[in-house]
Image: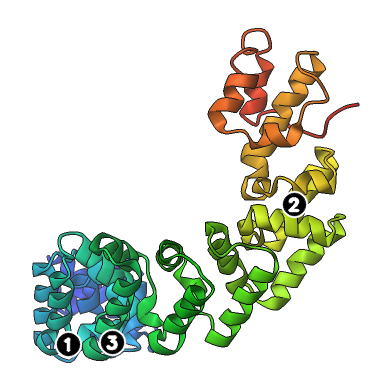
Amino acid sequence: MFHFICKTLIQNRIVNSKTSYVCYIHTMPFLSSVSNPTEKQPLTVSYLINSCGLSLEQAISASKVVNIKCTDQPDLLLKLLSTHGFKKAHIASLITKHPPLILAHPEKTIRPKIEYFESLGITGTDLPMILSSNRYILLCSLKEHIIPSVNFLRGVIHTNENLIFALKQYYAFQANIKNVMEPNVSTLRAHGVPEKHVANLLMMHPRSLKLRADLFKEVVCAIKEMGFDPMRISFVLAVRSMSVISKVTWEKKKEVLRSFGWSENDFLFAFRLQPRLMICSEKKIRNMLVFLTTKAGLMPSDVARCPYLFLMSVEKRLSPRCAVLQVLMSKGLISKDIDLVRNLNYGKRFFEKKFLTPFMEEVPAVIEAYQGKMGFQGFSD
């Protein structure tokens, strides 16, 4: 086979050229499929790889959507982006997410949007970071979509610093501002939610405001009926939790809690304390309850009074801490009647100061237990 390849290369006068050799090998009939997109659109694939920074796989996928027949306009586009701080990684991210962007007109379509964002004070590394994180921004209408979206954001979060923060992690350009986002913000305001809490929800959890307006109203009313105070931050956190979960999933999670002995009052008490409880997956809720009730020996009501535990990791935090406490109990150094829930919920420094530092020399095993090297199977009687 090697002899055959060499003979073929010589016959085609490709000698002493590493680049030519590689290109030839990639296009030889017996080494490439006839359906390979690189044969159909060699310019598109090679341009996307060499000029835009895409991988071969990404370029082949993009070539199914776009066909670059001439590189003049794409070259101008890349030059425009690079002069405004876009690195190859930003460009690759943009083109991978939305291949047609490479064919966009640099002066008519892209430059006005870049200049608009710069006029907002978004420059330096922030500009490419924001624009490359959202494939819709550079191709949607500046007048009909981008400007109204930014104006909406400004009307809620006010400061330019918060605006930039929101744009870095925000999906407003994918949302229906007029028919969804604005009505939902109005609903919160109508129920007396403070502006700073509305802004917090918009900046940190914008997905919750993308729920259909009539359904969002139902969520807000349901949260209010559960006893949440619209003036407190827990209200919008509860709205966030319920608005991003379907009714079916919500009920499934509650059923898991009920299967471990939780009453409706237990649920309401826990949810009011920590609304993020319902953001946890069914699997995590179940695994946490198995650990806390079976291994740690807690009653359902014990767990309900400290739902913050659901946000922790069994493997990285709860199990090692229980192992430490088990070691100390077995040595008679702490009482078996300690408030387990409180001690599991302590901050890292406080827990270490109370249960590790005083006993490290006398009982080195607490270090191994804390590092997760000792499995915890439950507290012995």
State the residue position of label 2: 287
Mark 1 element type: helix
Which of the two labelled residues, at mark 1 and mark 2, occupies the earlier sequence position? 1
95 vs 217, nearest the viewer: 217
347 vs 92, nearest the viewer: 347
Q: Is residue 290 left or right of residue 75?
A: right
Cα–Cα gap, marks 1 and 2: 51 Å
Residue type for callout 1:
Thr
Mark 2 element type: helix
Q: Residue at x 33, y 82 (%)?
A: 62
User: Considering the image in quadrants, where does the N terminus appear?
Assistant: bottom left
Can see residue 232?
yes
Cα–Cα gap, marks 2 and 3: 44 Å
Mark 3 element type: loop
State the residue position of label 1: 109
Q: Is residue 276 left or right of residue 82?
A: right
Q: Residue 145: x percent and y percent?
A: 29, 87
State the residue position of label 3: 140
Instruction: Name which quarter of the figure residue 195 lies in.
Output: bottom left
Which of the two labelled residues, at mark 1 and mark 3, occupies the earlier sequence position? 1
64 vs 300, nearest the viewer: 300
Q: Residue at x 57, y 33 (%)?
A: 347
Residue type for callout 2:
Asn
Can see residue 32?
no
Q: Is residue 152 above or below residue 104?
A: above
Q: Is residue 215 above or below residue 200?
A: below
Q: Residue 313: x percent and y percent?
A: 63, 45
Q: Residue at x 84, y 38 (%)?
A: 297
Q: Are marks 1 and 3 in contact (CB under 8 Å)?
A: no
User: Considering the image in quadrants, where does the C terminus appear?
Assistant: top right
Q: Is residue 265 left or right of residue 137?
A: right
